[in-house]
Amino acid sequence: MSVGLPFDALLAGGIVYLAWRSAHAHSLFAGIVLFIAFGLLMALAWVRLGAVDIALAEAAIGAGLTGALLLDALGHVKGGPGDERDDDEDGLTLGRPGRALAAALATGVTVVLALAVWWMPRGEDGLHAAVVAALAEHPVGNAATAVLLDFRAYDTFLEMGVLALAGLGAFLLQTRTLRQAPARPPSQGSVVLRAMVVVLVPMMLMTAAYLYWAGTSLSGGAFPAGAMLAGAMVITFLAGIGHRFVRDDALTRAALAGGLAAFLVAGGATLGAGRTFLEWGGWTYPAMLAVEAALTLSIGATLGLLYVAAAKAPPETKPERADG
Amino acid sequence: MVVDALVLGLLAASAVFFAGGTLGLLRFPDAFTRLHALSKADNLGLGLLALALALKSGEAVVGAKLALIWLVAMFVGSAASYLVARHALGVATRKEPPP
């Protein structure tokens, strides 16, 4: 369509400009806010490229959850409300050679990526024909879900291992050997925040369930659904009623390990049935659904734990009683 | 034909409101006035945008979804504005802000 190219050019220019401004912001907080805006423009770029599943994951995880993590980290660094130290005082300034090296590395990576995209097989070359043929007779309609959980299920299995390690690392941050700078406390369990939780969390849970279920034929799948669950965890924690999430007990550990365990059990079952590891065979649809359910819960728990494990818990608030 | 003209008009009005909100963000002196400009103008801009897109699509289901998106965005925007203003009030007066 005729408006395509100017819009795409504006979008690409906006992405580059926002990235530059985010790196050169006058304060860390401004840099983080610009980074979140950059993430949203990236999600739009993914939509323009036709990859709606990636756009959902980018908006939820890249812009949303990462932005929340960065803001929490900023709270740890600043050390308390009203601490408006100049950001240049931390002593971590790069000199001329440092900046030249950073610029060279960034340019090099960009050139490599551009070449990779340029030399990517187009049209009917490469694996495209094989994938299209396999998708035509696949019980699952969404190409991304079919690739993630059937054609390249092994990659997703390893990814779950990485996520489990990340969750473990988040818990390690809670040890007392680190110098615990108090995080800037969230709004002390404001009444409005709790009302927000009451209204939003049921909607988020419903949307997560819908994204999981619709991921088989429309855009969605385990990762956006898990990110939605993580968002619900974070907002419940910020309202002061999510202390359950920070406790390190059997349920938390089970949630962290759930995705990996699901893959191992399913893979073991396929091995026992005489096929190769994670080759679903005739059980494709139910196996994918079951593994995806475990993945959604595990991804949601791990991403949420990445936030709450290091954040300082707001004071436990009891709902106010109406007196008199 | 008429619908397209209406959609274009609504989109233009929405753009005007968003631009006005951004202008307020850039030009107003402190946090409270900026929040006022943002929440009012952007909510109305989003409503006009949702209406324009609903008219353009012509389906009732899409219109209902867009209306729901607008309502949720308004709700979250108002709550977030309140929380930001509460924090700003606490910093400005240096005592515990109201709940």
Image (cartoon, rainbow, N blue to C red):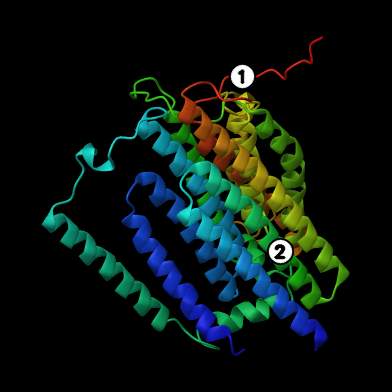
In depth, the one of A54 and A290 nearer the eye is A54
Q: Is residue A3 left or right of residue A195?
A: left
Quadrant of the rendered image containing residue A211: bottom right
Chain letter of mark 1 equals: A
Q: Residue drawn at (70%, 54%), measured in percent from left and top?
A: A273
- The label number, if any, that marks residue A316 in the structure image: 1
Q: Helix or strand or loop: what does disc 1 sit on?
A: loop
Q: Is residue A14 left or right of residue A294?
A: left
Q: Helix or strand or loop: what does disc 2 sit on?
A: helix
Q: Amino acid at mark 2?
A: Gly
Q: Is residue B91 left or right of residue A303?
A: left
In depth, the one of A168 and A312 nearer the eye is A312
Q: Residue drawn at (79%, 70%), measured in percent from left and top?
A: B54
The x, y position of residue A324, in whole percent, is 82, 9
Chain letter of mark 2 equals: A
Quadrant of the rendered image containing residue A256: top right
Q: Residue drawn at (54%, 88%), measured in percent from left and top?
A: A123
The x, y position of residue B26, in whole percent, is 46, 56
Q: Is residue A306 above or below residue B46?
A: above
Q: Residue drawn at (37%, 25%), measured in percent from left and top?
A: A181
Q: Is there one chain holding both mark 2 and mark 1?
A: yes
Q: Amino acid at mark 1?
A: Glu
The x, y position of residue A297, in whole percent, is 66, 43
- The label number, if any, that marks residue A132 in the structure image: none
Residue B97 seen by the camera = yes
Q: Earlier in the sequence, mark 2 or mark 1?
A: 2
- Dot 2 and dot 1 residues touching (CB under 8 Å): no
Residue matched to label 2: A281
Q: Is residue A228 above or below residue A121?
A: above
The x, y position of residue B80, in whole percent, is 61, 42
